[in-house]
Each structure stands twice: as structure tokens, then as C-alpha cells.
Image (spheres, rainbow, N blue to C red):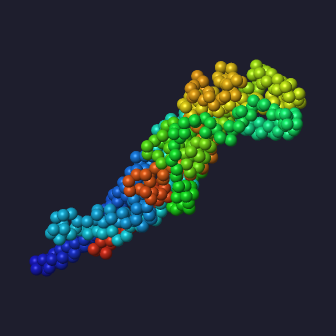
Amino acid sequence: MRSSAKAYLTVFLSLSIMIILSLILALYQGARIGAVRMKAECVADISMNSCLGEYSRALYDQYGLLMVDMAYGTGKGSVKKMEEHLKYYADKNFQRNAVGKLTGADTMLSMNCDEAKVTGFSLASDGEGAVLNRQILAYMEAEPVEGLLSDVLKNLSDLTSAGLDSTDVEAMAAANQAQLDAIIPPKIINDEGKEEEVPLGNPADGVNCFKSLGPLVLSIPDKSKISTATASLGTLASHRELGHGTGLDESGPTDAQKLLLEQYYYEKCSRYGDTLDKSLLKYQLEYMIYGKGSDYENLQSMAWTLLFWREASNMLYLFSCSEKVEEAELLADTLAIILFMPEIRDILKYSILFAWTFAESISDLNILFDGGRVPILKSDRTWRLSLLNMLLFRDFLRGGDLGEGLYYQDYLRIKLFMTDSSTKTKRMMDIIEMDVRKTAGNSGFRIDHCVDIFRAEITVGTRYGYEAKVDKIYGYEE
């Protein structure tokens, strides 16, 4: 009986040990598979974060934006380069430590990265710059929206409600001049017995002859104050076909977001009177409005805009000021009497008033470009030129300040706010490219090579035949 019992016990223990060993091995196998999966997840996190850690330093330093330049300083960006960097970081994290390499020891995992693929990504230029705007808004999220740019909105309202953006004074002056030109001037017999036309002697002609020079030349006599910087626009984002990522499904910015974007432009971009060493074009806000290839052209365009506004404002005041209108009437009456042409009295009066308006407007521009203030609407207190001064208005362009009103940058902000949002976004991409290309190692920088969010699939293999795939999305705001 005893030997039989022992035999039963032996069989029982053998079967139990096999079951226990199978359980232990199954648990070991499960632990290994779980460890493989967990390490694959950890390595994917570390590797993707490491890729994001390679953000463009120049882009961050100058504009506070976190994006990976897929060109990595080579000027030729591609998702393949990003995949190479991702796989490099994954391989590094799967490598054995120094002791393991020396001894040839292996671990229970023995993992390696078989493949690292970037399956989706957003470029800064996607959605016509929607990705770039999202980054800017993230940068500006600490800025209070309440009261932001309230002065700009008020100034814009004052300007538009007075009709300064829609009143073309130069067209009115040209129509009046056409009437004057159509009048046949009187003739006299000269000493040689020939007929000779008598000049009208219109004092407005002394002002009008300078109009062809343009407002910028007239209002900034010292041309050395104007930047001569130029840019090759054909190589910039708004002038070439852009690369595309997966993009974002977003609508345009809300009104509150537009205010934040405007504030960002003011903080990061230069303008006339406040230039930055980092910038290629020194008048960047002017470029965002007009998009010309040189600082001179952009500032000249702004000068024409200012002249349009200032002439409308000055005409409103001048034509309503009875004292000044009487001065112009008196001068026109005198000329009409001398010429025996009473029919030209009113035409001459308006010709003088339009010339006076132009001269005062050039004086306003001279003050603004010199750093002084000019109010949106004039008054007796802020009117500068007398009728006599008008005749020699260029001698009175000495800058100064009218004691109240807006500075040049205030008028510039009004015009910038009136500019289409999508146009500003495109030109902001141009400005970023211009400036980053000036930094060392970034001569070929392109905004449509910059990634802020990407999706990756990392395939992990082991010596034991197991495989794991990790699919993750990582970005600077995730």
C-alpha cells in the first residue's frame, strides 16, 4: 500500500509541477509581452518628445513660436527627415546599456525599432496660415482681451464716420482744375504786335506744381531717414506654391482672436520710426499692409494713404471755416477783376482752397513722419499754415507737434486693422521667413516646412518573435 501511495503522490506532484511551471511560464510570457508594450509606449513618448525638442531656435527666439523645421537647417524639408530623427531617438532608447554591451548580456525584452513612420502632420502654412495663427494665439493667451486695441477701434470709428476713407479730395481738385484749364485765357498785343496769352496768375499753381513729386518726397526732405532695404518676394510664402500637411479644420479667427493677432503683430514687427536689427525689411507693418518689395515702396504707399485721409480731414475744416474761405474769395476776386474775367471767381476760389488743403496735408505728413501728433479732425488751434505760408509751404516743413491727436503709429494701426486678415497672415509668413533666413544655418528656411503637431506609428520587434505597434499624436499644445 505504501509503495502504491508513493507512486500516486509522485504522479500527482509531477502533474502539479507541470501545471505550476506552465502557469509560471505563461505569467512570465504575459509579463514580457506587457513589458514590451509598456516600454514601446514609453520609448514612443520619449522619441516623439525628443523630435519636438528640436524646434527651430531662431523661430522661437524671434517670434516665440514652437515648431520643428523638417529641413533641419538644410533648406530641403521632408517628412522622411523627421522619420529618420524619430527612428534615431527610438533606437537610442532601445539600446543596451554599457555593461550589457561589454558582457554581451541580454534582457528579457531584447527590443528594437523596426520602423518609425510619421503618418500625419500639420504645417504652419496649412489652412492659409490657420496653424500659424493657432500658434500665435497660444503665445498670446496670457494677454487680456478686454480693452485690447480699444484706442485703435475708436480711432477707426472716428475716421470712417467722418468719411475720411471715402472722400477723394484729389479727384475733386482735378475736376476743378479741368474747369479752369478749359477757360480761354485773355490775350494782349505785345510790343512786337503779336497776340500773347495773359497767365492767370493762380497762386495755387505754385503748390500744384509739386504734386508730381509725391507725398513721401515732399514730407520727408531728408531721404537718408528712409530705409533702402529690399526683399526678393518670389521666394517667399505668399508668392510660391506651399507644401501641405494634414492641416486643421478651422474657421477664421473670431473678433477677439483678431485683436490678439493684431497685438502680436505690433509686438513682433518693426515699422517706420521703430526698426529692429533682426528684420530684413525695416518697415514690416507697412509690408503687411501693402506687400511691396522694398521699404521705400511700402512707406510711399502709406504716405499716399495718409495724404488721402489728411486731405479729406483738412478740406472738411477749411471749407467750413468762414474766415479762411473769405481769404481765398478775396484773392480770387482780385485776380478775376485784374483779368476782367468775373466768371472764373468761384473756380479760382476752390482752386486756392484745394491747394491750401494739399499744402496743409503735406505739413501734417511731415509732422507725423517726424514723430509728432496730428488730430484726426482739425480745428482753429491745430491748423498750421496761413494762406501766405501756403505759397511757400515747403519752407515750413520742420516737423514739430500739434499738441494733440494721433502719432504715425496710430494711423498705421488703423490702416493695418482695415487690411484683410488672410492677407496679413500670408504676409506675416513672409516676414517670418525673411527674418529667420538672416540667422546662421537658416538661409533656406521655409514656413511650410515647420511642424507643430504630428502623428507617428512606431513598430517594435523583439528577438522572441513579438511585435508591438504604437500610434500616438504629439504637439506643443497636446
Q: Quadrant of residue 76?
A: bottom left
- Give x and y (percent) for residue 366: 60, 32
Q: As drawn, is 187 to the left or to the right of 241?
A: right
Q: Quadrant of the N terminus?
A: bottom left
Q: Nearer the viewer, residue 238 or 389?
A: 389
- Give x and y (percent) for residue 326: 79, 21
> Height in image: 41 above or below 186?
below
Q: Quadrant of residue 257?
A: top right
> Height in image: 62 above or below 116?
above
Give the number of callouts: 0
Look at the image and tell me whether residue 265 can be seen. Answer: no
> What is the residue that sits farthest to the front in this orientation?
192
Look at the image and tell me whether residue 171 can be seen. Answer: yes
> Height in image: 412 above or below 472?
above
Q: Residue at x 70, y 23 (%)?
A: 388
Q: As drawn, is 294 to the left or to the right of 305?
A: left
Q: Quadrant of residue 17?
A: bottom left
- Give x and y (percent) for residue 199: 81, 34
- Give x and y (percent) for residue 459: 37, 69
Q: Nearer the viewer, residue 254 or 240?
A: 240
Q: Residue at x 52, y 46 (%)?
A: 228
Q: Residue at x 85, y 37 (%)?
A: 192
Q: Nearer the viewer, residue 257 or 371?
A: 371
Q: Residue at x 36, y 63 (%)?
A: 85
Q: As drawn, is 159 to the left or to the right of 426?
A: right
Q: Nearer the viewer, residue 203 or 473?
A: 203
> What is the residue that sits farthest to the left in this orientation?
2
